[in-house]
Every structure is written in C-alpha cells, then in structure tokens.
Amino acid sequence: MTGARSRARRAARIRPAAGVRRTGAGPAVCAVLCLGILLAQAGPAGAAPGAPVSGAPVPGTPAAAGTARPGQPSSGGAEPGSLPVIGQSRSAGRADGCVKPSDKDTDRMPWAQAFLRPETAWQLGRGAGVTVAVVGSGVDPASGVLGGRLVPGPREYGEGASTRDCVGHGTFLAGLIAAGRRDGVGFAGIAPEARVLAVAVTDDAGNTTAALLAKGIRDAADGGARVIALALPVAAGDEDLAGAVRYAGGKGALVVAPAGPDQGSGSGSGSAPAPAEVLTVSDLAPNGAPNGGGTDSGGSGGVGSGTSGTSGGSGAPGGGAGRIDLVAPGGAMMSVGPGGKGYFTGSGPSFAAAVVAGTAALVLGYRPDLGPAGLKDRLTSTAYHPGTALPDPRVGYGTVDPAAAVGAPAPAAVPPSPRPAPTVAALRPPSPDTAGHQAVVTAGAVLAGVALVTGTALVCAAGRRRAWRPGRWQA
C-alpha cells in the first residue's frame, strides 16, 4: 500500500495541472539563449575568426596597391614622382658622364611593398645565407643599404671593380632585392638579409653583348649564387648564352631575367623567347595592370637576338614576343642608386625581375633543398593566377606572391593550358578574407549550432515527459 501511494505522488508531480498545456517553450528558450551565445562569440559579420596560431604565416594573395597597413609611413620626404630616373642605359637623352647621386630622401613605403607585403614571409626567413647575383652595370655600395652583404665579383668589360656603377641600374636592382630594413624608413628589399654578388658586364652606357652576358652568368654560378638576376632580357638562338644558362642550372642556380626591355632603353632588332630554363618576368603598373613587357611584333628583343643592346618601349607582346612566366611590380619603382643614400625611380620589366629574384631568395632561405627547376615551379605554382587559361600571354602564370611562395604547402604543378587564353585587363587580387565570405561562414556556423541545440532540447523535453523511462515496446 505504501508503495502505491509513493508512485501516485510521483505521477502527480510529473503530470501538469489541469488546464495547463505543454507549449515547448523550454526548448525554444534554450535555442534562443544558445543562439545569442554563438553570435556573441562570432562577433560582427565580416570580422576575422581569430588570430592565426603561431608558426608559418597564413598564405595569402598580394594586397591591393595602396592598402593602408599598421606602421606604414604616410608622410615625409619626396614624392616618388619627383625622384631622378634610372634606366637600363644612359642613351635615352642623358648627358655624358655617370649618373649623379640623388639628393632626394623619403620615408614613404613604396607601392610595390604595400602590394606584395613581403614582411608576411619574413617570420620564416629573410633570405639569410642565400647569394643573389646581379649581372649588369655593377653595384655601388655607397647607399649602405646592403651593409656587409655585398660581394664584389668580376668585371667583364672595362676597367675598375664591379662595385663601380656608372649607369646606376645594377645598384637599383640590388636594392630591390636585398636592401636592409632601417628604422623610420619604409623602403626595404624583398629579401633584406640575402647576400648580393655584383657582376659587371656592361660599358658605362649600359650596353653589352651576348658573349659578355654569358660570361657574367658563368661568373655568378662559379661565385656561389643560387639566384642570378639579369639586368637585361635574353633571347634564344645564341648557343653561348644557352650554354651559360645550362651551366648555371648545373651549379644549382636559377636565372631570372626580364621578359623585355625597359622603357626608353637603347635600340635593337630580332626577337625569340628566352631559353626554357630562364624564369622570365614582366611588369605591373601601380594600379595592378600588366604593362606587357614582352617584346613587340616589330622585333624588339634582348641580348642574343642579334643586337648588342636592348630595345625601347614596354609594349604588349605580339608575334615573335618573348615568353612571360610571371609578373611583378615594375612600374614607378623606388630604390637606391650610386654615389649616396638618395633614392631614384624607374619602370620596366628589369625591376619586376629583381622583385622575383628577391622572392626566390626568400624561398631558398626557408627551403634550401630546392633546385632551380623546383624553385621555378614553386614560384609559378604559388603565384596569384589570373582567371584565364595558363600560361596567359600577358601575365604568364600570374603575380608573384612572396608569402605563398615561402609558406604555402607544396602545390601541384600548374600544367599549361592546351588552348590560347584571352588577355587580362588587370591583376588586382582581392583581399584574401572578404567581409562577405566571413558573413556567410558565420551564418552557417550559427545555423548549425541552432539546429544542434534545438534537437538536444527537444530530446531532453521528451525525456522529462517520460520521467526518463524508456518507451514501451508494442508489437
């Protein structure tokens, strides 16, 4: 009898009072509370989900030109447009005599650095232990940006050391590749701890020959360079040049060359694509558009194409144009020059090639076991690819990406497309994490959480109704 009364009292506590309906408000309230918690944790739509874990940087795409960044200098010094100009040669209306030192100073960050953001790769390395040869007019140490990392190599033409640079072009390229970081100064090289091997192969006007350039490539390889940055474009058809490129590859060096001549350089005729082992680079303007630094259909070409100089004008490639593997910033560039600490400006594919050579040094600093072919493949496969068939005639495999080239997992090789691609109007990659993308991710996470919480609450309510007793089985 006592047991029956106890069971009756428990049943009365479980049953609702007369006239009261179960509305399921409890599960709904739980769902709403959990939704609020999820939204509070997610933050506003578009907010980053959190800081990345320590270690390798998150691979990204080159930032849009002009993007403001913490610590970016915003004022002070000369505007880039007011800087004196340096080119591949001194023949474009310049008076006789060597380039005079610049008295222009600036603490502004060049647009190319804001575009590429190489500092995102610097936590993995800055090119220390890697030697990059600059084969051109020489490298003057007077600016001091290379510190003790400048190694004088041979001079194959004229008198004096390879640290004498009458044209200023080689010094400019060396700064783009490896200028060290200085407090309060925005400018720095892509690989600010790499060594630079200076190899001089031009006369005092910037002219050279295929034979001299081939000697310079061999000198660079013998000097221990892992990356050889050529100041001038090369073309297939000269066996001495092709042999020098193969020799460098056998020594473990990748040759990087401009796909065409810089604006306002000398004249020449004849053209052919560079040897396949050479990584050829064309230039981007400050607005991210490709300048098309390949040679034109009129036959403007590089060293080895039957000319002792380079041709004028950076134009869209046409019939008989030089091959383009990558593009990089090359228009309105800023770097150092000979004779002092002042800055210069210049535009053309040779400056873009220096940027890619610096990126190659960054990669080798972190991945020293890569050979020339593997290094070339990594630079092209991690580039920001255009939305066209590859390689695109204007931009090749896309825009070089220092952060991805250094830190990204090894990507699959990008096979050439079997059909021609339409030309590309611009290469301004979007921000890697847009607000719209983050909003979609946040909303999806919230909906999934709500479904899980609501289902759990309904199960709990059903269990309470049965006093957590299993349901009866009815045959």
Image: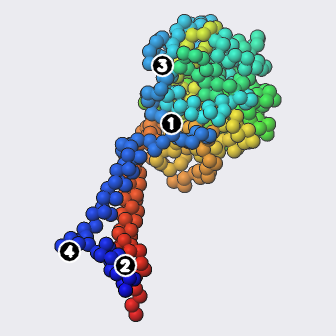
Foreground mark, 4 or 1?
Answer: 4
First reached walking from the N terminus: tag 4 or tag 1: 4
Q: What residue type is labelled 3?
A: Pro
Read off the residue under disc 2: 6
Give the residue at mark 4.
18
Which residue is disc 1 drawn over? 62
- Near mark 4 (Cα within 10 A), the count class, few <14, some 14-19 or many ≥20, is few
Q: Are marks 4 and 1 in contact (CB under 8 Å)?
A: no
Residue at point 43%, 80% (across, down): 470
| Image coordinates for residue 248, horizontal then vertical, percent | 76, 35
Where is residue 317 shown, x and y percent of the image?
Answer: 51, 37
Identify the mark nearer the N-term, 3 or 2: 2
Say the numbered circle drawn on residue 223.
none
Residue 288 x/y as whole percent: 45, 33
| Camera-side residue of 465 and 192 | 465
SS for tag 4?
loop
Separation (CA) of disc 4 from disc 2 = 21 Å
Q: In which quarter of the image is residue 5?
A: bottom left
Residue 470, above or below 170: below
Q: Earlier in the sequence, mark 1 or mark 2?
A: 2
- Residue lying at the far right in this picture: please name it: 222
Give above or below for 41 relative to 118.
below
Vertical comparison of 392 with 86: above or below: below
Q: In this rendering, which labeled residue sits more in front, label 3 or label 2?
A: 2
- Please tell me in which quadrant of the rendered image residue 155 appears: top right
